[in-house]
Image (tube, grey):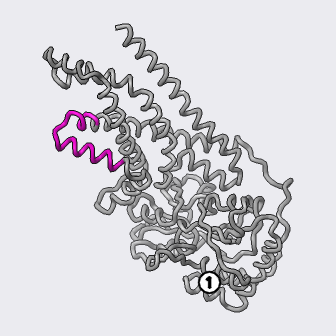
Amino acid sequence: MWGFDAEGGAPYVFYDLKHPSKLIGFEVDLVEAIAREMGVKVQYFQNAWDSILLALQRGDFDIALNGIEITPDREQAVLFSRPYFAYAEQIVTRASEIRINCLEDLRKKKVGTLYNTVAKRMLDEMGDIQVNSYSGQVEPFKDLLLSRIDAVFVDMPVALYYAMPNPQLRLVGEPVGEGYYGIAFRKEDTALVEEINTILEKLLRSGELKKIYSRWGLWNTSQEKLFLHDELLQKYTESPPSVSQKVPLRVTTFLPTLLKGALVTIGISILSMMLAVVLGLILAIMRLYGNIWLQKISTAYIEIYRGTPLLIQLYILYYGLPNIGITLSALAAAILGLGMNYAAYEAEIYRAGIQSVPKGQTEAALSLGMSMRLTLRRIVLPQAFRITIPPMTNDFVALFKDSSLVSVIAIVELTKSYSMLAASSMNFFTLGIITALLYFGMSYPLSLYARKLEKKLTRSSSSR
């Protein structure tokens, strides 16, 4: 069984637009050739890329093959086959960009890349670069075309597939940072590693591997050298490092990154909730006291936003609106997306709170000559606010957790920071506990404050 992530995109593994149920890509062709040599049928297992090695260790599938770069930290966790592809990192810019001509020119620029990759590590090590990390391969090129970033720095296969056919983009400078993709196995599957290493060698000697790579425009001298050096075969079939050689996880190393992600989460959550509260109150008043058209607009808004996934709403705001000439920054799209979504839920909470206030109070106020606006401000809303505090608090806590979805538009908040660090270190448990405690530390004080405020309002109301 083969584990992969088709969401990663071309030219590795992706769905054929002409036949949407069919997977294609150079790695699909490679796996099918290996399976044919082994006399077995390929079984496919879709898995999120950032947890693909963890799923492999769990036993969800037998091999993980999906542009997985062979790195020392990953070699601590799994076995690798001999390399099946030699890659290098490539800079891509807009065709009109004249400021960037080499790697050093990326300093002080906004550069997009894929998270948990060698390319990202290279950019981080250089420093003085604003790195935007993406989980998919299409998104950084979209942001590049929209001028949200200055360049993209990714593995050569990705750059060739997405940039070469597009006249608005160009490849800059020579590829740098050569490395290797390998097939990952569980540590106990040494016999399977040896068998597939033999098959890879056979596919090369027969010329089939060259045909596969040439079909996707990926065959070059680097691939020829890769299979002509016998020392590579010896290196990647040696025994893996022992447990005692593993580098221990130091919390102090990872905590600053998690805390930085937590600050992003707090900022986005607070601003989004402020928008949700204001917009939700407006929607509730429109639905209860507006004319027939305002009521229909409010109802339609609430039902549409409650009936569609937040993830789709974020994609439309960030990647869809540019198609009609509206381009938002990632931060603006995140705040608007979360705020507008939660406004629909807040509106229903406020509507229920307002309707819970006895109608006699409103009628009495109006009979005394108070306007409807003054009645709402002085009589109805203060009482409704006290009633709605508990559900509002629950919504705010839920929004804290839902803020993790904004990572799809290249914002690195707390959950995304955890995903990247855990995938890099292969320590999902310890980092997961730390991340969970950070979320608890952010949300629990809010719950305590809400209870305190609720008691205060209750005492204030009873004393009147």
Residue displayed at 83% across by 74% down: 191
User: Where is residue 363 shown, x and y percent of the image?
Assistant: 19, 20
Q: Is residue 297 magenta?
A: yes
Residue displayed at 49% across by 45% down: 402
- For the N terminus, the quadrant is bottom right
Under circle 1, the secondary element is loop
User: Amino acid type of disc 1?
Assistant: Asn
- The stretch in magenta equals 284-305
**Can you name the residue that lies furthest to the top here?**
463
Residue displayed at 49% across by 19% down: 452
User: Where is residue 236 shown, x and y percent of the image?
Assistant: 79, 72
Residue displayed at 60% across by 37% down: 438
| Left or right: 369, with 399 as reference point | left
Is residue 265 positioned above or below 33 on the image?
Answer: above
Can you tell which quarter of the image residue 4 is in?
bottom right
Q: Is residue 154 visible?
A: yes
Can you tell which quarter of the image residue 389 is in?
top left
Q: Is residue 173 visible?
A: no
- For the C terminus, the quadrant is top left
Q: Nearer the viewer, residue 95 or 378?
A: 378
Q: Nearer the viewer, residue 436 or 173?
A: 436
User: Where is residue 412 shown, x and y percent of the image?
Assistant: 53, 49
Mark 1 lies on residue:
220
Q: Is residue 236 magenta?
A: no
| Left or right: 186, with 136 as reference point | right
**Within 10 angstroms of label 1, few (less than 14), some, or many (20 or more) residues?**
few
Q: Nearer the viewer, residue 23 or 211?
A: 23
Q: Nearer the viewer, residue 312 or 147?
A: 312
User: Where is residue 414 shown, x and y percent of the image?
Assistant: 56, 44
